[in-house]
Each structure stands twice: as structure tokens, then as C-alpha cells.
Image (cartoon, grey):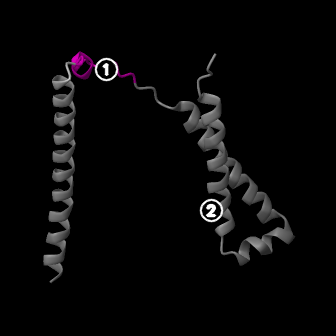
Amino acid sequence: MEDLMLTLVWLGFFASIFFGWYYFLQARNKERMALIERDKDVSEIYAKREFRFRFPWLKLGMLITGVGFGLTLTVLMMMNPVLEQFVKRTDGMVVAASIILFGGISMVIAHYIDKPSKN
């Protein structure tokens, strides 16, 4: 029974990939045919687009800085006797929450810093 379920899961996975790709190609073909029927310019569809990959070093650096700041904050909280009990009572969830919080804040800041200005 377990083998049957595993087989069905894999078949469903590959079927969804196949049908997703099929309907994507079908929709693209219909769009092109509609443009050709209306005598629109189709050259821009077949034109090669310039692709330039830039690795997001700023965002990665800001994320690492935010995570480091969250870890530093939790270490400082553990050194404080009053806050240490709070961290221990929450079973370390404060550590995970501060890492996620400051990592997210740093990603938002990096997004606004890296965003090109509209002049």
C-alpha cells in the first residue's frame, strides 16, 4: 500500500509538471497566432532578450549582518539575569524570532538601498 501511494505521488508530480508545461506552450502559441492574425509585429516575440545576471551581494551582506545582529542581541539578552529567565522560559524561541526579525528587516533595508532611483 505504501509503494502504491509513493508511485501515485510521483506520477502526480510528473503529470503536473508535464501539463503545466503543455498549457504554457499552448497559451503562448495561441497568443502568437492571435498576433499574426491581427497583423501585429511578431519580431519582438522572437527577439533575443539581453539577460544580465547580477549576484545580489548587497542583499546577501545585509541579510548576514541582520542575522548577526539578531544573534548578538540574544547573546546580550542571555547575559542579562532578568532577560535570561525570559529566554529560557520561551525555550529559545526568542533566538529564532530575533534572527528572523532582524534578517527580514535587513532584507527590507537592502531592497530600498538597492532599488534604482527614478530620476
In front of the other: 98 or 111: 111
Span colored in magenta: 40-52
Indicate whether 3 appears above or below 28. Answer: below
Query: What's the residue type where badge 1 is placed?
Result: Arg
Where, quadrant-wise, is the C terminus in this rendering? Answer: top right
In the foreground, 88 or 47 = 47
Residue annotated with mark 2: 96
Tally of numbered tags? 2
Whole-angstrom CA distance, mark 1 to mark 2, is 42 Å
Q: Residue furthest front?
A: 38
Mark 1 neighbour density, 10 Å: few (under 14) some (14–19) many (20 or more): few
Task: Name which quarter of the figure residue 4 lies in.
Answer: bottom left
Residue 41 sits inside the magenta stretch: yes
**Of the residues shown, which amino acid type is indicated by label 2?**
Ala
Tag 1 secondary structure: loop
Residue drawn at point x = 15 percent, y = 46 percent: 22
Q: Residue at x 17, y 40 (%)?
A: 25
Which residue matches tag 1?
49
